Image: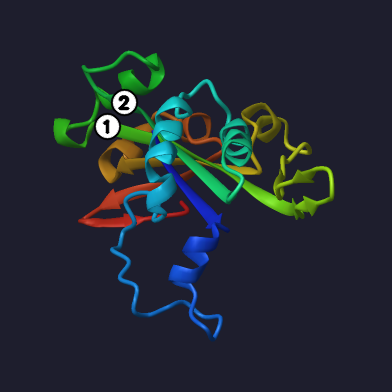
Amino acid sequence: MIYSVMVEDSTPDMIKTLVGKDGKLNQDVEIPLPVGGLLNPTLARKFDQFIEANSAYSLSPTTIASNMDQEFDALHPKQLRRIILGPFYSAGITENNATVNKVLESVGNPKNAWLLTWTIQDVYSKSERPAKKGLWSSEPAREEFHIDTDNLEAARMGVSAFEHHALVPHEAYQALYAAGEIDKVFAGYKTHIISRGQVISDV
């Protein structure tokens, strides 16, 4: 699994560091790309510990984003993405799907007898409840995450949106097509075919 998150940091020290007097990003601050973690040195270690404790597949993306929102008053997760790689089908290696495996065994070149699938799950904030500061109590700003309840699979995953993808060599795609398994195997998937060193998408 691969995770990425877009976070707004409202820590006063970070605002002073990153934002210039003109209200724009301070160009003098060197930000290494790609960013390999939280830029805020005060919260970086705690953030890494949070990620280790909240990266299990059993947790939905919304649960992870909500936990982050509750754990860090100054961090505001605007979008969290989880990419689930697999399953990977290859003739003679896996028996995850007997139909796919049987067709792949008929592919002439064993190097082209494989199929990789992955799922992209996204959860994003639809709004932010502003912070409340009172004489006797206060509440930090909190995110309200969108769940697509009109889509049963999205609701089951606990996500705002999702996509299924499949990558397959042209020879293996032809074999699946000849076997009449295309509609069954790739139903609900965005299919990407490797042909002559190029990737043809949205087949």
Classify residue 103 by image quadrant. Answer: top left
Could you tell me residue 13's position as x and y percent?
A: 49, 62
Which residue is farthest right? 135
> Separation of disc 2 and disc 1 at Cα?
5 Å
Q: Left or right: 189 with respect to 67?
A: left
Outermost residue toward the bottom in this view: 22
Quarter of the rendering containing residue 181: top left
Residue at position x 66%, y 43% in the image: 160
The numbered mark, 2 or 1, whose residue comes first in the sequence reads 2
Q: Is residue 72 visible?
A: yes
Query: If the image is split into quadrants, where does the N terminus sit?
Result: top left
Residue at x 48%, y 80% (from the top left corner): 20
Q: Amino acid at mark 2?
A: Tyr
Q: Which residue is mark 2?
A: 89
Left or right of 27, for residue 139: right
Residue 70: image location, x then y, percent: 63, 37
- Which disc number belongs to residue 78? none
**Contact check, label 2 and label 1, Cβ < 8 Å:** yes
Residue lying at 31% horizontally and 55% vertically, measured from the top left: 199
- Could you say whether the residue bearing mark 1 is in a helix, strand or loop? strand
Given the image, on which type of amino acid does mark 1 rest?
Trp
Give the class, few, some or many, for how many residues have Cα within 10 Å of label 1's Cα (few <14, many ≥20). Answer: many
Which disc, if any, is residue 114? 1
Q: Position of residue 44 (x, y in %)?
A: 39, 45
Residue 109: in sight, yes or no? Answer: no
